Image: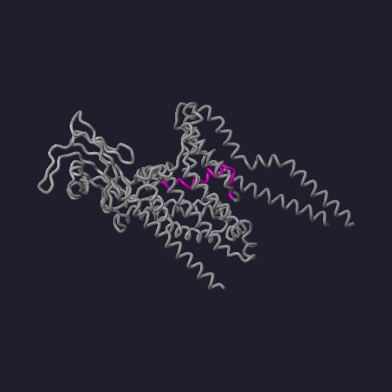
């Protein structure tokens, strides 16, 4: 009887494994739908756009230097099972406050960037702490909660920047301050730190500018993330990300670990925003941060990441594909329809569509895995009986 | 044991904060930017005067020409830090020979904009004679302030529609 049972159980497992093998290609395609879709879009749009390879490489490298640091900020909360951190906008706001001060104090170049980053740290930490505490109270709904928190903090940011700066918080220069005597102008010039990091150690290869220093900074953050995963805290975060209850039973302070992950993400996002804005050369005081989280998340998802799994490779693939689409879509749209605005609309709706598709796919995958597990368990129980 | 770790952690945190403050202070000094204006204009100071400024002065900062000044002209450049260095190519008269002068001077930290009168500097006037603070003209007070755009939801249009 026990032999028969063992054979039946073995058969069930074998059939399951064969099915799994047969579906592996399909699964691979299914789990990489978004990157594949983007590769196809880019492959179609690149020849239509008519851009030269040198131009495209130049643009991609510039945008990679500008955005990668910000996108890397998303990895740590994903590791801790908190999903896509829409609250990275908080770090961006902290960085903007730092940049406003630096601009008013007339600190130029890389020292200005470093000072803005240092100023952003305590603000990012405070905002990250608030965000982390709220997200702990909204377990399982972290993404929507962090999305709404970013709107809430945006209101406070506007209150500070629009009414308190210049009246309570001293702002001296009229180039920064509104003519009415308080509040910050719509645009603050960062001309004196524009591309200072990108130009540092930059090399030019056949008309393609490689911002070496920016890539070194990005590389250092990548190394930090790789190292951090191996630390005790990093392991704790992974454990919390896999199963909070098991992690709690293992003696991990789940709440504290989750707060630290959001705090780190917010601080890194602040640094990323400084790098992003030094590349742009100006700061749109009331709107620079508003879409940054959305585009960073879209880029990460385009790279094949999901709500619960993301790697450094996903970041680089995502930023390349997403921004390639951003570069070629308006021109391709103009060539196809005669109106460049079509391409503009296309790239914006694609960004939102990617996030939507990724979220749907994540939910579908989770449900499918649950039902597969249930099926396997039922089969095993049947075999045991 | 726990106390020991807390002490170590506290020390580490204090050290990190101190280090960050130190770096911030350093950046504050090193990165202080100034706008330097160059005047090739006539000048008088303490009873002495220069009525005919040189025909032309080319100003080079960091090996880059930042100003090409005929008599009566003003040029400008941005400079980071307080140790300002420049090279001047001076042509005293039209068709005359170029003279080169290398100048290094200290810029006061508290001044955002500095006006250097180059003929006075070349004539060896004291600092007060060639260096003055640039004071921007007061902006005209306009009734209309800059319109602030904070409406990321695009709700302004909706309000109009609802009123109708």
B155 lies left or right of B51: right
Residue A306 is covered by the magenta coloring: yes
- Figure quadrant of residue B15: bottom left
For the view shown, which residue lies furthest in the left direction? B47
Which residue appears at 20% of the width and 37% of the height?
A: B73
Quarter holding the C terminus of chain A?
A: bottom right
Image coordinates of residue A101 in percent, x first then y, are 35, 53
Total numbered labels placed on residues in the image = 0
Can residue A220 be seen in this snapshot?
yes
- Identify which residue, A291 or A258, lies in the foreground: A258
Image coordinates of residue B122 in percent, x first then y, are 20, 42
Residue A168 is covered by the magenta coloring: no
Which residue appears at 43% of the width and 55% of the height?
A: A152
- Figure quadrant of residue A197: top left
Image coordinates of residue B23 in percent, x first then y, are 40, 57
Image coordinates of residue A363 in percent, x first then y, are 62, 48
The relative height of residue A189 versus residue B9 in the rendered view (above or below) is above
A48 lies left or right of B92: right
Quarter holding the N terminus of chain A?
A: bottom right
B149 lies left or right of A255: left
- Identify which residue, A74 or A366, lies in the foreground: A74
- Magenta span: A288-307
- Identify which residue, B54 or A86, lies in the foreground: B54
Which residue appears at 39% of the width and 46% of the height?
A: B151
Q: Tell me the colour scheme of the image.
A: one colour
Can residue A69 be seen in this snapshot?
no
């Amino acid at each position: 009887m026990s032999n028969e049972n063992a054979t039946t159980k073995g058969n069930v497992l074998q059939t399951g494994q064969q099915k799994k093998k047969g579906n592996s290609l399909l699964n691979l395609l299914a789990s990489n739908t978004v990157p594949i879709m983007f590769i196809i879009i880019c492959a179609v749009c690149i020849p239509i756009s008519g851009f030269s390879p040198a131009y495209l490489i130049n643009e991609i490298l510039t945008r990679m230097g500008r955005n990668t640091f910000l996108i890397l900020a998303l990895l740590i909360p994903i590791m801790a099972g908190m999903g896509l951190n829409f609250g990275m906008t908080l770090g961006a706001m902290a960085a903007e406050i730092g940049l406003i001060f630096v601009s008013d104090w007339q600190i130029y170049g890389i020292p200005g960037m470093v000072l803005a980053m240092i100023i952003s740290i305590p603000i990012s930490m405070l905002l990250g702490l608030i965000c982390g505490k709220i997200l702990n109270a909204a377990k399982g709904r972290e993404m929507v909660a962090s999305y709404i928190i970013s709107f809430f903090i945006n209101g406070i940011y506007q209150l500070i920047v629009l009414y308190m700066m210049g009246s309570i918080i001293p702002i001296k220069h009229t180039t920064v301050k509104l003519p009415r005597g308080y509040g910050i102008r719509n645009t603050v010039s960062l001309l004196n730190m524009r591309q200072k990091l990108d130009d540092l150690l930059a090399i030019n290869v056949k008309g393609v500018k490689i911002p070496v220093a920016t890539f070194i900074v990005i590389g250092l953050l990548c190394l930090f993330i790789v190292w951090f995963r191996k630390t005790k805290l990093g392991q704790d975060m992974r454990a919390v990300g896999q199963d909070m209850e098991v992690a709690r039973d293992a003696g991990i302070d789940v709440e504290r670990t989750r707060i630290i992950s959001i705090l780190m993400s917010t601080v890194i996002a602040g640094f990323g925003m400084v790098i992003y804005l030094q590349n742009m050369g100006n700061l749109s005081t009331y709107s620079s941060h508003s879409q940054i989280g959305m585009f960073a998340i879209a880029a990460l998802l385009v790279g094949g990441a999901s709500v619960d799994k993301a790697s450094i490779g996903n970041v680089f693939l995502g930023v390349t594909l997403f921004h390639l689409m951003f570069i070629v879509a308006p021109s391709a749209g103009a060539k196809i329809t005669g109106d460049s605005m079509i391409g503009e609309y296309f790239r914006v709706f694609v960004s939102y569509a990617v996030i939507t598709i990724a979220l749907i796919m994540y939910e579908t995958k989770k449900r499918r895995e649950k039902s597969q597990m249930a099926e396997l368990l039922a089969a095993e129980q049947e075999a045991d009986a | 044991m726990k106390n020991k770790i807390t002490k170590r952690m506290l020390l580490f945190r204090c050290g990190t904060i101190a280090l960050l403050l130190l770096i911030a202070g350093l950046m504050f000094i090193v990165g202080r930017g100034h706008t330097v204006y160059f005047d090739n204009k006539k000048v008088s100071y303490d009873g002495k005067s220069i009525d005919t400024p040189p025909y032309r002065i080319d100003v080079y900062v960091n090996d880059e020409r930042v100003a090409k000044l005929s008599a009566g002209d003003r040029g400008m450049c941005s400079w980071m830090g307080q140790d300002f260095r420049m090279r001047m190519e001076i042509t005293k008269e039209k068709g005359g020979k170029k003279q080169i002068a290398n100048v290094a001077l200290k810029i006061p930290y508290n001044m955002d904009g500095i006006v250097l009168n180059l003929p006075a500097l070349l004539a060896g006037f004291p600092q007060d004679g060639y260096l003055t603070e640039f004071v921007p003209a007061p902006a005209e007070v306009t009734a209309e302030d800059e319109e602030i755009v904070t409406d990321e939801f695009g709700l302004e249009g909706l309000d109009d529609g609802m009123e109708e």
